[in-house]
Amino acid sequence: MMNTRSVRRTAPTHDHPALHAILERHAGRPGPLLPILHDIQDQLGYIPDAVVPQIARAIQRSRAEIHGVLRFYPHFRSQPPARIRVEICRAESCQACGGDALQAHAQAVIAGLPEDQASLAPVYCLGLCSQSPALMINGQPHARVTAERFDALLQAALEA
């Protein structure tokens, strides 16, 4: 005889001490989802799919809601980041001062590296408009970046 009870499948959990501390720190606060996601990504470097059920339980939301937020905001990563994260400003000032050429150059250079070494992402205004084009490498801003300067900055980051 076949058992007709439904079996609830659960995703594996991600048992990281930082996750428990983050959820505890935000317990009872109104609208904690975005701060929780930012804190997890700051601690782990990304937001593993396995933490979604734990977040959902902690803030009494559905996993679908959590996944929806993660997919809506491009800032959140579901995979570990590359060792070197390059973010090039795509705002108007940087584009007008050579940002498109810098973007194309960086894209070609990074495409030649192993995937886990470097990644390239757009950002929309680093606040360095008077010193365009600008970019960040692992959170460190750089202004008036040329293709040659980009190569040097990337090489220094690869050697670090």
Image (tube, grey):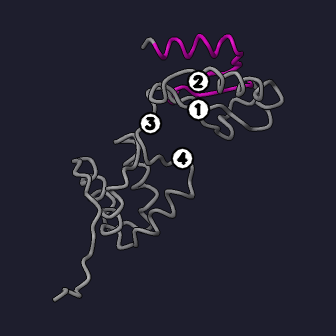
Local SS, label 1: strand
Which label lies toward us, 1 or 4? 1
Read off the residue under disc 3. 81
- In the image, 26 versus 70, the foreground residue is 70
Mark 1 or 2, nearer chain start: 2
Mark 2 or 4, nearer chain start: 4
Q: Position of residue 98 (x, y in %)?
A: 79, 24
Read off the residue under disc 4. 75
Quick check: marks 1 and 3 in contact, CB under 8 Å? no
Which label lies toward us, 4 or 3? 3
> What's the amino acid at mark 2?
Ile
Q: Position of residue 11 (x, y in %)?
A: 29, 62
- In the image, 103 versus 24, the foreground residue is 103
Q: CA distance from mark 3 to mark 2?
A: 14 Å
Which residue: 65% across, 31% down?
Answer: 88
Local SS, label 3: loop
Mark 4 or 3, nearer chain start: 4
Looking at the image, residue 129 sits to the left or right of residue 121; the answer is right
Which residue: 75% across, 27% down?
Answer: 99
For disc 4, the neighbor class at 10 Å (few under 14, some 14 to 19, many from 20) is few
> Where 73 sits versus 42, above or below?
below
Read off the residue under disc 2. 110
For disc 3, the neighbor class at 10 Å (few under 14, some 14 to 19, many from 20) is some
Q: Which residues are magenta?
A: 132-158
* Circle on res. 120: 1
> What's the amino acid at mark 1?
Leu
Q: CA distance from mark 1 to mark 4?
A: 12 Å
Q: Position of residue 69 (x, y in %)?
A: 51, 61
Q: Is residue 147 magenta?
A: yes
Quick check: marks 1 and 2 in contact, CB under 8 Å? yes
